[in-house]
Amino acid sequence: MFVRFVRAFAALVLAATMPALAALKDGSKAPDFTLQATQGGKVFTFSLADALKKGPVVLYFYPAAFTPGCTIEAHDFADAIGKYRALHATVIGVSHDPLAKLQKFSVSVCRKKFPVAADTNQAVEKAYDAVLAAAPAYANRTSYVIAQNGTIVYSYTNLNPDKHVANTLAALKRLETAK
């Protein structure tokens, strides 16, 4: 088990040095999905179609709960949740982790501010072309901004978590201005 973890970590480090490429193209129709999710430890069904009825959606994929980069990214999203709400946006994080693990992650790392969903069979990761090529058991760190009409208006892939929040907020502001 430890050797498998070390190999996966090494693959993530190697992938971090690769150029950042967006997965699905801006202007594409976002694949619809429904997943079991948790916010503040409470389990519910998250539906992209239902979330889009309320406004744009920031969908972000991350490799694994409780890893250093994913913890940083979740903290950043939690810290900025008021800015997302001001732009009428819903934030949802997705990984392959089991729901029981995400219940703990949603409380301690996401600080009960936004939901995270379990894509245990990676169907949604695959639909969004967000599987990490160097370690296919994990998602690549990819963020999407999906307009209320279901169109992807922004996508960004980079294993470094530093710019995902700033970039998605900027895309939402551009979307708001374009109305």
Image (tube, rainbow, N blue to C red):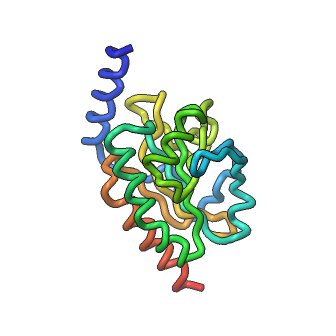
Residue occupying the point 37% across, 67% down:
166
Q: Nearer the viewer, residue 40 or 38?
A: 40
Q: Residue at x 46, y 29 (%)?
A: 136
Q: Nearer the viewer, residue 169 or 29?
A: 169
| Above-or-below relation of 160 to 179 | above
129 shown above or below 154 = above
Give residue 63's position: percent from left, percent from top: 43, 38
Quarter of the image where the N terminus is located: top left
**Which of the image's four quarters has the C terminus?**
bottom right
Count of all numbered marks drawn on residues in the image? 0
Q: Is residue 29 left or right of residue 85?
A: right
Front residue of 87 and 25? 87
Q: Position of residue 138 (x, y in %)?
A: 46, 33
Q: Is residue 11 above or below residue 109?
A: above
Return the x and y of residue 152 as percentages of the image width and height.
Answer: 58, 62
Q: Residue at x 52, y 47 (%)?
A: 106
Instruction: Give left or right: position of 163 versus 25.
Output: left
Q: Position of residue 21 (x, y in %)?
A: 39, 51
45 relative to 112 in the view: left or right? right
Which residue is rendered at x = 29% and y = 41% of the image? 16
